[in-house]
Structures are given as C-alpha cells and as structure tokens.
Image (spheres, grey):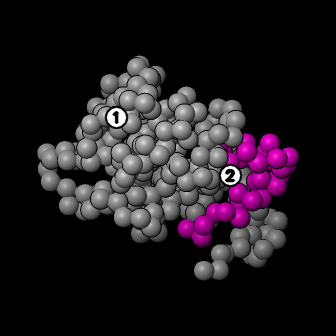
Amino acid sequence: MLNGRNGEVRPNASENPSKEVFQSQRAGARDRALLVVAPAGVVSNALLAAIECEFRFLRVHIVPDLSEACTSLVANVDLVVIERGLIGGLAYHYGDLSAWYPNAMFAVLADPNEHQDGRLANLVEQRMVQGVVPTNSNLDIFLSILRILLSGGEYVPSVVFRSHLADNGQSARTRRDGAMSELTAREWQILGHVAKGSQNKIIANDLGLSEHTVKIHIHNIINKLGVHNRTEAAAIYFARQVAGPNGSDGHRQSQN
C-alpha cells in the first residue's frame, strides 16, 4: 500500500489543457481529473487526499482495472496513472484509453528499483507511457513528479532503462559513464554544489532557482547516476574531476 529515458524533464510538444490550468486555476474549482487505475487497497485514501489537497483544481478517481477505465464516465482527465501490475494489458487497451482520454498523459505507478522485465521500458519507448511515478519516493517528490506530468512534461527514472541495458550485456562502468554524459549543464552545476556540501536552500539562492526546482534536479541526478544518495553522487563528481577526460571540469557541455 502506498503511504505517502533518464530521469529527465522534457516539455511535451502536444498541447495539454492542464498547462493553462496551472496558470489560471480558480480557487475551489475541481474541473480537471486524475484517473488512478489500481486494485483496491494499493493506493491509500490518505495519499488520494494528499493529491487533492496539493492540486486544488483536480478530482481524483480510482478504478480497479483497465477494462473499467475504458468505460469510465470521468471527464476532463489530464493524467491516467496505472499500477505496475496492470501494465501487461496496457498495449491491448491503449487504443480505447487514448480515444476515451484524448488529452491525457499516461504514467505507471511503480518502484523503479524492483526487478524490471523490460515491459515498462518498452512502453516508454513506444510512447504509450510518458511517465513513471516512483512508489519508493517521499511524498514531496511524489507530488512534484505528478506536477511535472500534469504540466505536460515527462519523467522516467533512468533505472527503468538501466536494467534494460544490463539485459543487453552492458557493463556497469559503461552505464555509469553514459549516465554522466547525460547530465545537463545545470545538473552538473548543481552536482558541483552538492559535492561542496551545500544545502538545497543555499544552492537555490546561489543559482537563482526555487528550492523545489533544486530538489527535482538532485533527484534526477541521483537517478541518472544510479546511486542511493547525495554522498555517492558527490563521490562520482570528485572522481570525474580527478580524471577530467573532457576538459578542466570533467564534463563535456552539450552543443545546442
């Protein structure tokens, strides 16, 4: 019970009415909806209440399976969140779901650290799923990821693809080096502050960001590097600084 291709956040090119809802939401008006597809007892009432408390414009509905989701009369759905145990039937039901909820993003509720059999990565690659909401994250991170998805962005922890790569015989060292190269310039900058021992509030003040944004960046960095905490991320930063294969700071800036 819940109590509470690389971790990146990308804007979605397609229009999503929830973007405008964030810009001009009316107090007390719940004119948008989030549909949770999960067996009874998987998602706690406390978590559903926390979601509605955080997103005042949102009504949360829950149905037990994908078949019922295809016939639900819920209107104005911006996000459909599907429990991981049900994704085996998503490909079969996807046509009906996307027709029934044409403006909705689709996400999977899962613990990314559990064994992955490749199905979730395949769904992301096929664009049937735009997000993975980690069940092992704290409530602040959980709600922040929902906010990203409701805003039309995408969030997929890198570990979803890491096990997929492992099945193809990639070494841990190769995956780690690849993850380092995937860090954006901003993420590398924030990682440098983390390595100095700076707290989120200090990092936010130094870089002119909100503390919430810094928290999301650090969460992405930890996921991309496949580490467990800030200390391990800092250790990788210092190791790369010493090696410095691509320049004085060890990080090759993307040329955009």
Give the Cα separation between the discs numbered 2 and 1.
41 Å
Q: Position of residue 211 (x, y in %)?
A: 41, 56
Residue type at mark 1 is Thr
Residue interval drawn in magenta: 159-186
Q: Residue furthest bottom?
A: 256
Q: Magenta stretch containing residue 243, yes or no? A: no
Q: Using the image, tell me which numbered label, if any, was put on residue 71.
A: 1
Circle 2 sits on which residue?
Answer: 225
**Residue 211 visible at all:** no
Please state if 93 lies on the left or on the right of 103 as rendered. right
Characterize the magenta stretch by its predominant secondary structure.
helix
Q: Position of residue 67 (x, y in %)?
A: 43, 30
Tell me which residue sits at (20%, 47%) in the image.
Answer: 31
Please state if 79 lies on the left or on the right of 216 as rendered. left
Is 47 placed above or below 196 here?
above
For discs 2 and 1, the disc positioned in front in the rendered view: 1
Asked which secondary structure carries label 2, the reply is: helix
Tell me which residue sits at (60%, 38%) in the image.
Answer: 112
Label 1: few (<14), some or many (≥20) within 10 Å? few
